[in-house]
Image (cartoon, rainbow, N blue to C red):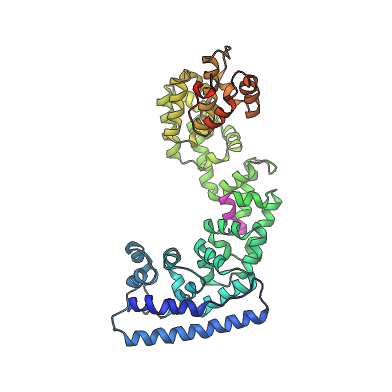
Amino acid sequence: MLHLREHLFLPLLRAATHFPTSAVSRPSASAASSSSSLHLSRLLLSTAAAARSAATATPFSVEDYLAAACGLTGAQALKASKKISHLKSASNPDAVLALLSGVGLSRADFAVVVASHPLFLCARAHNIARRIASLRDRVGLSDPQICSLLLAGGARGLRTCDIASRLEFWIPFFGSFEMLLKILKSNNAIVTADIEKVIKPNVALFQECGLTVRDIVKMAHLSRMLTTNPKRVETSVQRADELGVPRSSNLFKYMLAITCCLSEDKATARMRFWSSTLSCSRDDIRDIVCKNPAILGYSEENIRSKIEFLTSTLGCSKEKICAAVCKKPNILGFSDENLRRKINFMTTEVGLELEYIVERPLLLTYSLEKRIVPRHSVTKILQTVGLMKEFVGFCNLLTCSDEDFHARYIDPYKHAAPALAECYAKSCLGEKLNEVHLGM
């Protein structure tokens, strides 16, 4: 039966359900498309029923159907079947899959859509047909764009409502259909949330806080806040204000993202833990949080583990590590392996003492591959070939801007080492830099 459905009915249905329309159709075209879709859905149901009555009377299995007709793996089918176990026949799912096939989705695409949202198969076929027609005729989406929308997470919205009006709002807001897809992948609620009651109030509040559409798009947490209850967003803004980060600061958007994810009680508990662990006053912790809001997102277990790791690796007291963390709390955000490699290079290759690193935790925040190794390599080569004799403070070497670094360590040696600039650029991309490359 499933073999018959897959190889006979779905190809037939795909051909029958494709209604070509122009990018911006006239109302009469939309009505004709919707009417045709409704007629087709009734025809599909009667055709599928007739076929099943003529075939074997084997009891319908949701799990088998998901694997055979939708292309799900055994594990995916088992998981998805639990959400739609109430299905007793393939009549409606067949009609829904036919509509998906009609816009160009392949069997592999079926698997993506159904695995992420099994309930889509339970939507009424005539509703799906009408909503697809609306996307074509009202929004002006092409079939490939509709496919992309469904695969990005739009299937959930299409099952529950006509999402055309929401897309008409979002596409101009985000600037392009492609940007809408990007946001949709991380937050499919944007095609179901109420535009007037939820979205517009949140957008207005963000703009009041000085945030731009670009800020919202770039930060996943902020884009998810667009669909959050406006009262909760207002509370998050108030808490960010109370923590002392000015709205004019570039850090405000990060603080807002953190306060939205953490409850007030949890944030207070985190700050109390920081104060106790680092032996700092609450005011000092507040200052640290204002400079680096992300630390509120670090778990207590992560903080304890990282401090123990740094104490052991840098061979100093916990008090000194806590002092270093107070200077640069974001060092706790790096993995143990990342920090280990930096410390090992600076001690074995550069020759720094561990105490020097502990007193200058800023060194641990720079990229090993893109900053530490390339800059050290340049000065090492210049010293090796006798072009630079004075001692270079390693901290100053890393902290100076790219412009200053070129002005001091690259440009003065254009004639003596003409290939140095090119080799440095390649080193920043991961290529080992040495004097052989310089043609000396």
| Figure check: 82 above or below 50 | above
Magenta: main secondary structure equals: helix
User: Would residue 192 be seen by someone viewing this image from the given angle?
Assistant: no
Q: Where residue 11 sits: x, y (%)?
A: 43, 76
Q: Which sits in the foreground, 218 or 379?
A: 379
Residue 18 painted magenta? no
Q: Which sits in the foreground, 387 or 186?
A: 387
| Figure check: 258 above or below 199 | above
- On screen, residue 48 versus residue 265, left or right, reads left
Q: Where residue 287 sits: x, y (%)?
A: 61, 34
Quadrant location of residue 52? bottom left
For image coordinates 37% across by 70% down, the residue present is 66
Q: Which sits in the foreground, 238 or 323?
A: 323
For image coordinates 63% across by 19% down, the residue present is 415
* Residue sitting farthest toward the front: 439
| Figure check: 361 above or below 116 | above
| Figure check: 259 above or below 319 | below
Residue 227 painted magenta? yes
- On screen, residue 334 versus residue 409, left or right, reads left
Q: Where residue 28 sits: x, y (%)?
A: 66, 82
Residue range (magenta): 219-231
Q: Where residue 276 sits: x, y (%)?
A: 49, 33
For image coordinates 32% across by 64% down, the residue present is 74
